[in-house]
């Protein structure tokens, strides 16, 4: 369906055309008419399917330019996603002169206050910083007509439920609520029941969420061997641009340090980094100055970089939909991509569930030997030797050159030059990752067999992947801490507020683990 068939005004159609959009994506086609009709919508869609425009275009269409009040509020889990959403809404609404303000932790709040004072039709913000503005009285949400909860599953994973409840108290009860989420656990559906009015549930089918352009592999490996196996795979595959996922901030930091130690051009991002550092790393990655970006799921949300040819799941995700979201970083715009997932014997059930969702069987990848890894390094180094020879052939002192030529034969010199260019000594640099808590047994039984057993759920309700576990168990408390950012200065979890309009009925609920 073309955007011109969706009832949008010419200003927005012109902006859409400037963006290069022609036809609406499935999520846009299904949600835009519902949103324009004023209905509450729950949309399941991963990043890259155009969900920002799906909620942004109807909001921009309904903005009253003569009214300087905040008319729409978009809540995002991370700073990067808030910035990206603000930029896209600004571009789409430029011809209509819509003012969009982003508020997030890790940035000067005074500049944000100044922007709010000058008037903003739409505010995009992270939960903690929004709470900060509400408590300070520097934002007025009493005129909000549309509230968007973007990447709702990640906000719950990060422990933002109470913050979201506080924000909901500061917006009018009579409003339109749009909720978008890459995954749809039971906790998300309960939010729809509690905080939304007869929401329409739009779900993009799994075949629309994944792509046939991504070759999917898995490697079975014992935990203490994972890092060595990883670096040998990288030596052989030699990705041009890759994203690697680790489960925790500590894992990301250690992987980055280990990869650098073994000669790989890598950098990591997670919620504890300053906004300036995260922006710098992402810019370097997009420019190709960094070849491997190591990230947590949350930090990579909203990341859209062309040219990513490999995705490495160093830690398999707990829920299958997150896997789909991860591998969606590659195989974009018609380009081919590859994903490699590392799993232990006890994690085979997670692999089975992923295959059930994607309807595509992952192919086993046999770990490469040290000799194969060395050959991979050498093949790449051989290409760089040509450049070294061309740029340095006439620079060296001829007497020293003659001495070396007499001392060594040509084969020895070529081998030394090739070994130096390949940084062979870095291949076996000593490095050991800290042990990470394993994922809970998903279906019990013998996870070592492909298919496993069925002895019952050993960890029962502690499991995250079935929609529970957002409140009250230790595993999730740890997970919530992974990507909040620091409490000092980030603003993403600071000072919960309790002021504003009265709640809708039945908001004092607790998400339990056994649903």
Image (cartoon, rainbow, N blue to C red):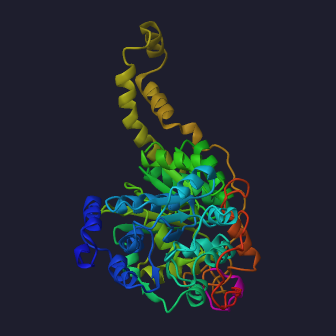
Residue 174 image offset from top left, x and y in percent? 53, 85
Q: Is residue 500 magenta?
A: no
Q: Position of residue 291 (x, y in %)?
A: 47, 47
Q: Report the side of 345 relative to 10 (left or right).
A: right
Q: Is residue 462 magenta?
A: yes
From this view, report whether residue 445 is shown above or below residue 362.
below
227 horizontally vs 175: left or right:
right
Provide residue 120's location: percent of width, then percent of height. Answer: 49, 61
Task: Confirm whether residue 98 shows in the render.
Answer: yes
- What span is in magenta? 452-464
Task: Using the image as rendered, state which of residue 239 and residue 272 is in the foreground.
Answer: 272
Question: Which quadrant holds residue 425?
Answer: top right
Q: Nearer the viewer, residue 34 or 263?
A: 34
Q: Which corner quadrant of the image does residue 166 belong to?
A: bottom right
Foreground residue among 81 and 62:
62
Q: Where 403 sits versus 125, above or below?
A: above
């Amino acid at each position: 369906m073309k955007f011109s068939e969706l009832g949008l005004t010419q200003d927005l159609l012109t902006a859409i055309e400037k963006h290069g959009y022609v036809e609406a994506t499935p999520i846009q086609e299904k949600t835009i008419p519902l949103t324009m009709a004023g209905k509450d919508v729950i949309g399941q869609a991963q990043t890259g399917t155009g969900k920002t425009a799906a909620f942004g275009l109807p909001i921009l269409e309904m903005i009253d330019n003569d009214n300087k009040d905040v008319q729409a509020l978009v809540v995002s889990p991370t700073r990067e996603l808030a910035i990206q959403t603000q930029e896209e809404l600004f571009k789409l609404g430029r011809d209509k002169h819509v003012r969009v303000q982003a508020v997030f932790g890790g940035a000067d709040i005074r500049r944000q206050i100044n922007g709010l004072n000058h008037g903003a039709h739409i505010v995009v913000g992270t939960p903690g910083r929004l709470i900060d503005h509400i408590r300070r009285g520097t934002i007025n949400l009493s005129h909000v007509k549309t509230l968007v909860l973007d990447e709702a599953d990640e906000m719950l994973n990060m422990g933002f439920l109470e913050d979201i409840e506080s924000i909901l108290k500061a917006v009018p009860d009579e409003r339109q609520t749009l909720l978008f989420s890459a995954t749809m656990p039971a906790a998300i559906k309960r939010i729809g029941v509690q905080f939304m009015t007869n929401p329409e549930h739009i779900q993009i089918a799994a075949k629309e969420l994944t792509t046939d352009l991504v070759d999917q592999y898995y490697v079975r490996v014992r935990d203490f061997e994972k890092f060595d196996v990883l670096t040998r795979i990288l030596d052989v595959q030699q990705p041009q641009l890759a994203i690697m996922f680790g489960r925790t901030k500590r894992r990301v930091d250690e992987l980055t340090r280990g990869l650098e130690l073994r000669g790989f051009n890598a950098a990591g991002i997670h919620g504890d980094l300053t906004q300036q550092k995260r922006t710098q790393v992402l810019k370097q990655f997009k420019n190709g100055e960094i070849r491997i970006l190591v990230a947590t799921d949350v930090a990579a949300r909203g990341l859209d970089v062309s040219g990513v040819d490999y995705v490495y799941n160093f830690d398999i995700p707990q829920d299958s939909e997150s896997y789909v979201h991860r591998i969606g970083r590659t195989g974009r715009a018609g380009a081919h991509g590859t994903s490699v997932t590392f799993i232990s014997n006890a994690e085979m059930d997670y692999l089975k569930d992923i295959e059930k969702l994607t309807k595509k069987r992952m192919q086993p990848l046999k770990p490469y030997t040290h000799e194969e890894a060395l050959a991979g390094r050498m093949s790449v180094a051989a290409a760089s030797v040509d450049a070294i020879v061309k740029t340095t052939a006439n620079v060296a002192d001829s007497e020293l050159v003659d001495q070396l030529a007499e001392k060594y034969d040509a084969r020895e010199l070529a081998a030394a030059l090739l070994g130096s260019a390949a940084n062979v000594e870095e291949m076996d640099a000593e490095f050991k990752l800290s042990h990470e808590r394993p994922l809970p047994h998903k279906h019990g039984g013998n996870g070592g067999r492909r298919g496993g057993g069925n002895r019952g759920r050993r960890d029962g309700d502690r499991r995250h992947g079935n929609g529970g576990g957002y409140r009250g168990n230790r595993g999730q408390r740890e997970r919530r801490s992974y990507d909040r950012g620091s409490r000092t200065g980030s603003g993403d979890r600071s000072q919960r507020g309790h002021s504003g309009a009265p709640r809708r009925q039945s908001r004092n609920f607790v998400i339990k683990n056994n649903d």
